Every structure is written in structure tokens, then in C-alpha cells.
Amino acid sequence: MRRGPPKVCVHTPPIPIPAVAHIPIALELAQFHHAVRLGRDGYAVAIVYVNGQANAEEAVKEVEQAGGRAIAVQADVADEAAVAALFDRTEQEFGGIDVVVHAAGIMPLAPLADLDLEVFDRIVRTNLRGTFVVDQQAVRRLRTGGALINISSSLTKLARPNYSAYSATKGGVEAITLILARELRGRDVTVNAVAPGPTATALFFDGKSQELIDRIAAEPPLERLGQPSDIAEIIAFLAGPARWINGQVIYANVGSAA
């Protein structure tokens, strides 16, 4: 049971331990179930959205119904001014930031030879530039004892056809994560990435036939898709007690890829 004031988490979705007299804040951008899980752990949560205002506000209600505090903030994660304003708003509301969970991403699919370069630029802007922009603000603002958690993908290992652009950006997310962890020597801030395998989210289901979904679900040894709650548990662990895990990519795919 968490005692004292909550930590603050910023959570960014795709298209957070009490300390001394402060509210821990988690900033999570992307999948709202992660934010709700952290809110239930006692974090004050800033939930970031681009277009899904109704879903973000519903997640705020879930956190509040569980006894937590939350706000929803609109921001384009690749826009440095919007992201700076997001962090400003979170600090003004809660007093500081302890955890940032960055999950924002888009996943248009096509063979490399056929992918429109304008679509490629959009994927890079959201997935790679967005990570750089959010992480840059995060490391400037996270308090001592904080955690930054980026969301990558096990597709960097699975090498599945049609995912070249998406996987390339997620490879970049992993590189940023590993280097940043070392750049923060002496700060007592951990930086890790979680790389889920196929997970039952809208991002995964979009554009896939039922036959393809069934085939992918049967691939791992547990013979099922991951659930958002599976990934949320790992994020909660990295956000809280897992202080000895730093500069790592956690491949959460139940054995689909090493």
C-alpha cells in the first residue's frame, strides 16, 4: 500500500511512491490502460491524447473512481512547444514529475518498396521524433528517483514483412533508451524500454483480417495475444520497485522472439 503523497506520472498513448512532501507524477502518452494501472497504484497521472479526448477523459474518471488524481492534456508528441506546455501543465497541477511513460505511436503497414514516403515521414515524425522530444523534456524535469519508460516493440526482433518503417522507428526508440540511461549517470533516474509482442489493442487489430489475427495469436508458446494488463504490470514494476533495472529493453512477448 502506497503511503504519503502520490508520485506523479505522465502517460502518452498511441494514435505513476510517495516521497518527502511531494506528489509523485507520472506522465504517460498513449495507451490509457497503463495510465489507469498507475493511477490505481497511487500515482497522480497526466494522460496525454491527440484525438481521443473522450477516451482520455474516461481514463481520468477511472483513476478518480479508484481514489487517484488525474488530468487529460492534449498534445502532439512531435511538437516541442506542445510537449513543453504539457510538462508545464503537469508540474503546475501536481508540483513535479516522477515517471514518464511514452507509448505514442502509429503503425501504417506496407512493403518497403510500396510505402509512400510521405507516410514514412509521418511514422518517423510520430514514433521517433516524438520519442526524442518527449524524452528530452522528461530528462530535464524528472525528479530524483524518477523513471522514464519508452514503449518499443518486439517487431524489432520478429522481422515481420510490411513492418519495415514501424520497426525502424522502434529500433531508434531502443537506441535512444540505452544511450540516455548512460547519459543520466549520477541523476538517480532509470531509463528503460518495454517491447511488447502482439497485444490486443486497437493499434494491433487495425487493418488485420481475423485469419491473420488468429495466426499471430497462435505463434507464442502461450498461444494467445498479450493483453494490455500484461504490459501495464511490467510498466508499473519499472515505474516503482525495479530500481536495479536500468538501460534495458524488456521484450514482453511470451517467447515469440528472444
Image (cartoon, rainbow, N blue to C red):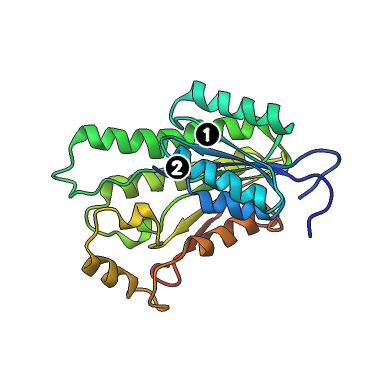
In-image side of 108 versus 177 (left or right): left
Where is residue 144, by image quadrant?
top right
Q: Position of residue 216 (x, y in %)?
A: 30, 68
Look at the numbered discs 1 and 2 and tell me whether their residues touch, using CB distance below 8 Å.
yes
Q: Position of residue 223 (x, y in %)?
A: 38, 77
Where is residue 87, by image quadrant?
top right
Q: Residue at x 76, y 50 (%)?
A: 17
Q: Nearer the viewer, residue 213 or 54?
A: 54
Q: Position of residue 7 (x, y in %)?
A: 73, 44
**Circle on res. 185:** none
Residue under numbered circle 2: 104
Secondary structure type for disc 1: helix
Secondary structure type for disc 2: loop
Q: Nearer the viewer, residue 93 or 179?
A: 93
Alpha carbon of mark 1 to alpha carbon of mark 2: how far? 10 Å
Q: Position of residue 160 (x, y in %)?
A: 27, 59
Quadrant of the image containing the C terminus: bottom left
When the figure is inspected, residue 37 is found, relative to residue 166, above or below; the finding is below
Type of amino acid at the residue the image marks with label 1: Val
Q: Residue at x 45, y 42 (%)?
A: 104
Residue under numbered circle 1: 134
When the figure is inspected, residue 239 is found, relative to residue 234, above or below; the finding is above
Where is residue 237, by image quadrant?
bottom right
